[in-house]
Image (tube, rainbow, N blue to C red):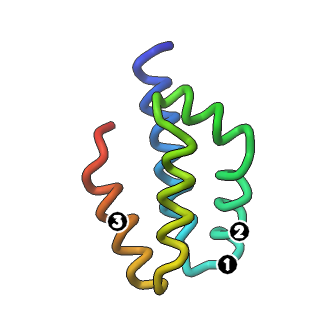
């Protein structure tokens, strides 16, 4: 795997995580559907990320009020390493 490919895959996964808490229901729905797909698993594998752990995180934050969800995702993404 090329380092650049891993960075692209990470950016795609991180964008999906951000989109999963979007105020736009179409964007949010598309992101959630993709996160549940095998394509998401493949992107995570390419990015050296654990799709199960990401899904668990998202499942937990979806129980929170919308504003808190977004803050949790922003905190996660602000501490990411690309």
Which secondary structure lies at badge 1? helix
| 62 relative to 15, above or below | below
Position of residue 40 measured from the top left corner of the image (x, y, whole percent)? 65, 42
Position of residue 36 measured from the top left corner of the image (x, y, whole percent)? 70, 52
> Do residues under tags 3 and 1 come within 8 Å of each other at their CB atoms?
no
Report, in whole angstroms, how far the alpha carbon at label 2 lies from the one at label 1.
6 Å
| 50 relative to 63, above or below | above
| 44 relative to 75, above or below | above
Residue at image coords 42%, 31% = 7
Residue at image coords 65%, 68% = 27
Report, in whole angstroms, how far the alpha carbon at label 2 lies from the one at label 3.
19 Å
The dot on residue 5 is none
Position of residue 16 measured from the top left corner of the image (x, y, whole percent)? 56, 55
Q: Which residue is mark 1?
A: 25
**Looking at the image, how many numbered discs can be counted on the residues?**
3
Q: Which residue is mark 3?
A: 74
Image quadrant assignment for residue 44: top right
Pointer 2 or 3: first along the chain: 2
Check the image and name the residue furthest to the left: 79
Nearest the eye: 64 or 71: 64
Position of residue 56 measured from the top left corner of the image (x, y, whole percent)? 53, 55
Nearest the eye: 72 or 59: 59
Which secondary structure lies at badge 3? helix
> Do residues under tags 2 and 1 come within 8 Å of each other at their CB atoms?
yes
The dot on residue 29 is 2
């Amino acid at each position: 795997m090329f380092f650049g490919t891993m960075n692209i895959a990470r950016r795609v996964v991180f964008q999906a995580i951000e989109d999963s808490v979007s105020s736009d229901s179409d964007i949010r729905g598309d992101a959630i559907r993709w996160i549940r797909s095998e394509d998401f698993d493949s992107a995570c594998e390419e990015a050296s990320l654990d799709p199960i752990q990401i899904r668990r995180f998202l499942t937990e934050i979806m129980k929170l009020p919308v504003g808190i969800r977004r803050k949790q995702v922003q905190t996660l993404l602000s501490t990411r390493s690309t």
